[in-house]
Image (cartoon, rainbow, N blue to C red):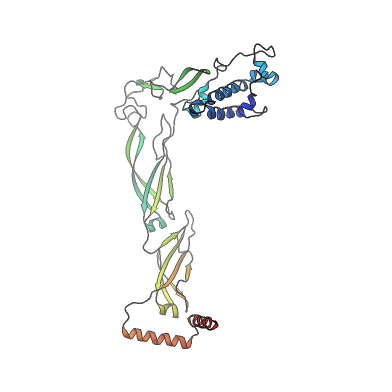
Amino acid sequence: MTDKRDYYEVLGIDKSADDDKIKKAYRQMAKKYHPDMNPGDKDAESKFKEVNEAYAVLSDPEKKQIYDQYGHDGLDPTSGAGQGFGGFGGGFGGMDFGDIFGSFFGGGSRGERRNAPRRGDDITYRVTVTFEEAAFGCSKTVEYKRIETCSECSGKGAKNANDVETCSRCKGSGTVTVTQRTMFGMMQSQKTCDSCKGRGKIIKNPCGNCRGTGNVKVLKKLDVNIPAGVDEGGRICLRGQGNAGINGGGYGDLYIIVSLRPHDIFERNGNDLYCEIPVSYAELTLGAELDIPTLSGTVKYTIPEGTQSGTQFVIKGKGVVYYNTKNYGNLYFTVVMETPKNLSSEAKEALRKFDTLCKTSNYSKKQRFAEKITNLFKKK
């Protein structure tokens, strides 16, 4: 038996590995080399058998102790070194491979109850509100379909309690054990019981309302409170308003996803509001008191003389309230000069005179820029 590889090396672990590490390593290696997952690898079958053989020994405390003391010879009944356990074709010591392969071959763990109570699914519902409704909060009535426990049979699925019997084949577990003979010995796995379809019970006289399922689909109407300050994509969770569970499990949740309609004036970033205010050249030049819109009305704001187009100002506390607090974001507005069109000849002449007066009375940035251009060409 000297041609056999060390079992610890086969599983990629050291001798100090505990049971959990041995089992975890085996799962990984068995999945890696399983013939069904490696149809083109000629060596996969032999490697898979080697992995199973290593696990059969290292997962058994008695075999592991003998192997640690005598090596492979200790397991050979003809060597006389140890007690010997014969070959590995007889089922690997009666291990239940349904538990090992369940995670990647679709089988269930041994003892798993398919008819155990399971929580119902969550439901997502999208509701659209106006900009102001999101800012100040509102109430919305939503209608959606959900699965509820049948009111006529209280979820039993039968007209009377006496019409429900425990499945005789799976004894109420919802699963049955299947034993197969393979090249590695007898292997056991679990599958859903064919007789009761995994429910663990047989209904002799089904409820006419739910047809034996215990659940019915209904149209649910619900008033939902949209809190002030909610933003685009905000999620509101209503506990227990989702679908009914299975086998007596609790209800899932309803998630309300909020969408905001765009606003004609404002844009929102978090709890701050932004907008542009059109102003005239005279207002920018001389300064002016402006009416600034907010979500709760207009406020007066004075911009100083000589304000440049594109300047941004802030009004603190005029944004959107922070959820579940009394604090508010800010309102940022940008003044943008509106250039007049279709001026009369009189207005044009007055504007030219005004421009001339500005040049003679104020050394402007435009004049300084013109001088720089002149000096640039003088150098050349």
Look at 32% across and 37% down and name the residue there: 218
Residue 254 shown left or right of residue 29 in the figure = left
Q: Position of residue 212 (x, y in %)?
A: 33, 26
Report whether 282 appears left or right of 2: left
In percent of the image, x 39 and y 76: which residue is there?
280
User: Can you say which quadrant of the picture contains the N terminus?
Assistant: top right
Q: Is residue 67 left or right of residue 29?
A: right
- Is residue 54 positioned above or below 120 on the image? above
Which image quarter holds the C terminus?
bottom right
When the figure is inspected, residue 27 is found, relative to residue 371, above or below; the finding is: above
State the residue lying farthest toward the front. Answer: 380
Q: Front-most of 58 and 210?
A: 58
Q: Residue at x 52, y 22 (%)?
A: 97
Q: Position of residue 217 (x, y in %)?
A: 33, 36
**Labels in figure, total:** 0
> Of residues 104 and 233, which is closer to you in this image?
104
Q: Position of residue 164 (x, y in %)?
A: 37, 21
| In the depicted structure, whether residue 217 falls above or below residue 201 | below
x and y, in percent, of residue 324 in the image = 48, 53
Foreground pick, 179 / 307 = 179
Q: What residue occupies the far left of the structure in this picture?
A: 208
Quadrant location of residue 295? Answer: bottom left
| Up/down of 117 relative to 314, above or below | above
Q: Which quarter of the figure has residue 247?
A: top left
